[in-house]
Amino acid sequence: MSQKVNRAYNFNAGPSALPLPVLELAQQELIDFRATGMSVMELSHRSAAYEDVHNEAISNLRDLLSIPENYEVLFVQGGGSLQFSMIPMNFLQAGQKAGYIMTGAWAEKAFEESKLFGDVYEVASTKAGNYRSVPSIDELKYNATDAYVHLTSNNTIFGTQWKQFPNTGDVPLIADMSSDILSKPIDVSNFAMIYAGAQKNLGPSGVTVVIIRKDLLEKANKNIPTMLKYGIHAKNNSLYNTPPTFGIYLLGEVLKWAKGLGGIHALEKQNEAKAKLIYDAIDQSNGFYAGHAEPASRSLMNITFTLKDEAAEKRFLAEAKQAGFVGLNGHRSVGGCRASTYNAVPYETCKALSDFMVQFQKVNG
């Protein structure tokens, strides 16, 4: 049972909250991990003790996401941002095109990186509406011969999220799920590849999860640097070089925590309840708070909103900080406010923010 400790109301967009029981276990095991006389950080990545940690994390991720056997699960480094380059390096062959669905800043970054490696184009974009929504499925126009189509499943800066994913048939669909992986059930078989930086829903920063279909691996470009080949990481069980062992250990413990809560369906139910608390405070404010995202595209992970004027926003953020809330400033590129309600953010933390918003409106409305 978790002891009473001083914990902030943490709404940071990433790195973000980790489950308190996981942090307490890591604290207990920090010096002597499973009677080895060493910290996990001191174990050789070739040791049996560490390989158990590594393989258990992969197994639990497979269980939680129901990952089919014809997919590899990899742990790589460089964050989601390195994947923006690795994907076209591996899969965008000469004479092919790749399509990118533009739904926010991270999709833009992925698109710009891909231009360095080949012929890419925009499948659809909601930029004209300041990314208040994701495109409808029937807006997506791509080519049957494309190397792949890329999308960002959840847009942290603008607070939008795909509710239904396109079926691209024989065209490989690749998704950046950095900010909503493990938050709700997904059909992994709908994607040729999923990637996610760990620091929002899976663990600490420094680990990137890649889930990749084996037949896509077989088509990868061989004439690129060794460490940028997905096939090398797959062949070596993500142990070709020294992985971020402590990060993978913590990721593995987060996955055990998620299973203990009841798995992916329990997480989804909890995330819906948490987000509803804050969206209700927005929707019932008679315009005092205004959500950025259109209701049909609202994210369960990142709730973005503004107040009636800049002075009110500054006062809101200042008083929230004094009340113990952390990370509510909107991204510098769009301003306003943002509450990131990832898996490890407790219901009670979201209830506290909802109550604070209602009370602030009563005083300042």
Image: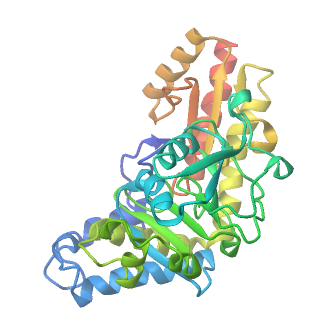
**Horizontal relation, residue 40 to residue 114: left or right:** left
Looking at the rendering, which quadrant does residue 77 occupy? bottom left
Please identify the quadrant where the N terminus is shown: bottom left
Residue at the outermost front position: 95
Q: Is residue 199 visible?
A: no
* Image point (52%, 26%), residue name: 333
Residue at the outermost right position: 138
- In this rendered view, identify the residue nearer to me: 184 or 315: 184
Q: Is residue 30 visible?
A: yes
Please identify the quadrant where the C terminus is shown: top right
x%, y% of residue 363? 65, 15
What is the count of numbered marks? 0
* Image point (62%, 84%), residue name: 68
- In this rendered view, identify the residue nearer to me: 96 or 316: 96
x%, y% of residue 140? 79, 50
**Horizontal relation, residue 32 to residue 257: left or right:** left
x%, y% of residue 143? 75, 58
* Image point (65%, 13%), residue name: 364
**Horizontal relation, residue 320 to residue 309: left or right:** left
The answer to whether residue 93 is above or below residue 218 is above
x%, y% of residue 224? 36, 66
**Horizontal relation, residue 268 to residue 294: left or right:** left
The answer to whether residue 52 is above or below residue 332 is below
